[in-house]
Amino acid sequence: MKQFFSFVLFVGISQTVFAQSFDHKHSVWDSLLKKHVKNGLVSYKGFVSDVSTLNGYLESLTKVTDSQYQSFSDKEKMSFLINAYNAFTVKLIVDHYPVESITDIGSPISKINLARGIPWKKEFFSLLGKSRHLDWIEHEKLRKDFSEPRIHFAIVCASIGCPILQSEAYVPTNLEKQLQTAKLVFLKNPKKNSYDKSTNTLYLSKIFNWFQPDFTKKMSLVEFVQDGFAETIKPDAKIIYNEYNWDLNELK
């Protein structure tokens, strides 16, 4: 019995030590982003050349067990999941590079891949002890476990229509500022979101249509996006959703 309790104590201490030693600054990923991302565009050729470093970072994520993850704070969990989503997305592109779009991954017909969400349902990595896909991170963890709609501006699907991939890792100590910055940068991009005062028409990214319930839990959609616009948007503004650009967000 004494040996059993000693073993349990050892395991508990080991998990605590690992949780404390895990690099919540995501330093390796941060350095890769600073090196290969410029103004939201990604040098996938650069990531291909640094694939061993990328794989090393991904391995550090994979080593985190579910019990260890549960010991993280909410901000540590969110940062972990956002960085994991973005890093594994880059890995998915790198593994199939060159491609013109993430929707090229799967069957030979990109429209079928997009309609069925094939690239995002592909189980190609392990996280928290099981085989996972990108949709699991987004829908089963980030959206389900956290009431934080701004995650939609932080996770990036390797496409021009997406919010930009920031040139830094998300970190717990700066997460609030980073999420708000990501939201404002996305909203203030006139190619994705704009307001025509003369016709009272609000042109928004389809992200706001696809995930509208996430943005309107506490306020209207107009109220949610208002801080991204200099002009006051009328509450009865007509909303039109722009076409989404699935071309690869590649730095050329």
Image (spheres, rainbow, N blue to C red):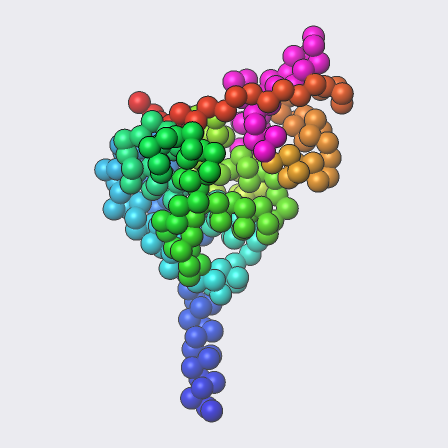
| Residue shown at 52% from the left, 53% from the top | 77
Which residue ends up furthest to the left in the rendered image? 49
Q: Quadrant of the C terminus?
A: top left
**Residue at 50 percent of width and 24 percent of height:** 244
In the image shown, does 126 or 187 lie closer to the viewer?
126
Asked if one can make out residue 19 in the rendered structure from this viewpoint, the answer is no
Closest to the observer, 144 or 18 = 144
Q: Is residue 221 above or below residue 10?
A: above
Percent x, y for residue 52? 25, 46
Q: Start and end of the magenta stretch?
A: 182-210
* Residue with the most extreme bottom position: 1
Percent x, y for residue 241?
A: 59, 22
Q: Can residue 110 be seen?
A: yes
Res. 85 image quadrant: top left
- Residue at figure coordinates x 47%, y 91% from the top left: 1
In the displayed structure, would residue 83 be above or below residue 63?
Answer: above
x, y (%) of residue 104?
35, 32
Q: Is residue 9 magenta?
A: no
Report if residue 202 lies within the magenta region: yes
- Position of residue 61 relative to residue 122, above or below, is below
Nearest the viewer among 226 and 177 is: 226
Q: Residue 11: percent from the left, percent from the top?
A: 43, 75
Q: Residue at x 49, y 30 (%)?
A: 163
